[in-house]
């Protein structure tokens, strides 16, 4: 697990360099590409392996970044991370970069879990409602997932808050309410 302070410092340095060189969007694309690579188990194991020589890691990453058409700044940054022995933290640093990028660009990340797939129109309506509510930024990165166990409805998560409007949640609440002893029944019987 990446130390949050280390990730924040290294991510901030890349963000600032990208801004200085007017390459922020290009570097963001490179970061997204590398995070996609990080979903590959072998790639993640390569970065964290103490057995693989850093020069070998550098060679592999250079080849991958060349194929991906990465910016020179990204290549130099990856080399710096490996030279400093921070390749183990690379994916955490890149995730932190994305977080800082979203903060800089005023983008809110909202996770929407629904019982069934939603149409593009519905997703746009959700984005508009969230933006209009003032609880999120006007620019929203909506991450969707499907969970049939919800039965119906949806769950929204953002800013550490969870809004559960699922049928399964409502049924659970009803069940809990019905299990409580009913004090009113005794009063009626008397």
Image (cartoon, rainbow, N blue to C red):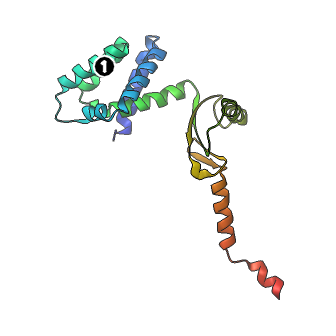
Q: Is residue 144 left or right of residue 165?
A: left
Above or below: residue 55 compared with residue 131: above
Decide if residue 83 is in sight here: no
Above or below: residue 161 compared with residue 5: below
- The quarter of the picture where the N terminus appears is top left
Decide if residue 185 is in sight here: yes
For the point 39% across and 21% down, the residue is 14
Q: How many marks?
A: 1
Above or below: residue 51 compared with residue 30: below
Q: Is residue 57 left or right of residue 23?
A: left
For the point 36% across and 17% down, the residue is 74
- Residue 98: percent from the left, percent from the top? 46, 28
> Where does label 1 land, which residue?
64
Q: Is residue 169 left or right of residue 66?
A: right
Q: Is residue 115 left or right of residue 21?
A: right
Disc 1 secondary structure class: helix
Q: Quadrant of residue 47?
A: top left
- Residue 145: percent from the left, percent from the top? 55, 40
**How many other residues sit within 10 Å of disc 1, few (<14), some (14-19) or many (≥20)?**
some
Query: Among all residues in the image, which is located at the extreme bottom?
Result: 190
- Residue 84: percent from the left, percent from the top? 24, 27
- Residue 63: percent from the left, percent from the top? 27, 17
- Residue toward you, 149 or 32: 149
Q: Quadrant of residue 174?
A: bottom right
- Residue toward you, 154 or 132: 154
- The quarter of the picture where the C terminus appears is bottom right
Q: Quadrant of residue 36?
A: top left
For the point 32% across and 36% down, the residue is 41
């Amino acid at each position: 697990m990446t130390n949050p302070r280390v990730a924040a410092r290294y991510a901030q340095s890349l963000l600032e360099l990208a801004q200085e060189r007017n390459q922020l969007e290009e570097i963001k694309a490179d970061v997204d590409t590398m995070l996609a690579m990080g979903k590959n188990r072998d790639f993640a194991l390569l970065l964290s392996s103490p057995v693989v020589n850093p020069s070998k890691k550098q060679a592999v990453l250079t080849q991958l970044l060349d194929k991906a058409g990465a910016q020179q700044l990204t290549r130099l940054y990856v080399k710096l991370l490996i030279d400093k022995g921070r390749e183990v933290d690379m994916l955490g640093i890149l995730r932190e970069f994305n977080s800082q990028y979203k903060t800089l660009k005023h983008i809110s990340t909202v996770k929407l879990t629904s019982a069934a797939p939603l149409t593009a129109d519905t997703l746009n309506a959700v984005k508009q409602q969230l933006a209009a509510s003032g609880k999120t930024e006007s620019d929203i990165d909506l991450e969707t997932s499907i969970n049939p166990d919800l039965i119906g409805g949806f769950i929204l998560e953002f800013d550490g808050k969870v809004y559960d409007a699922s049928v399964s949640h409502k049924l659970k609440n009803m069940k809990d309410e019905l299990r409580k002893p009913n004090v009113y029944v005794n009063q009626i019987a008397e």
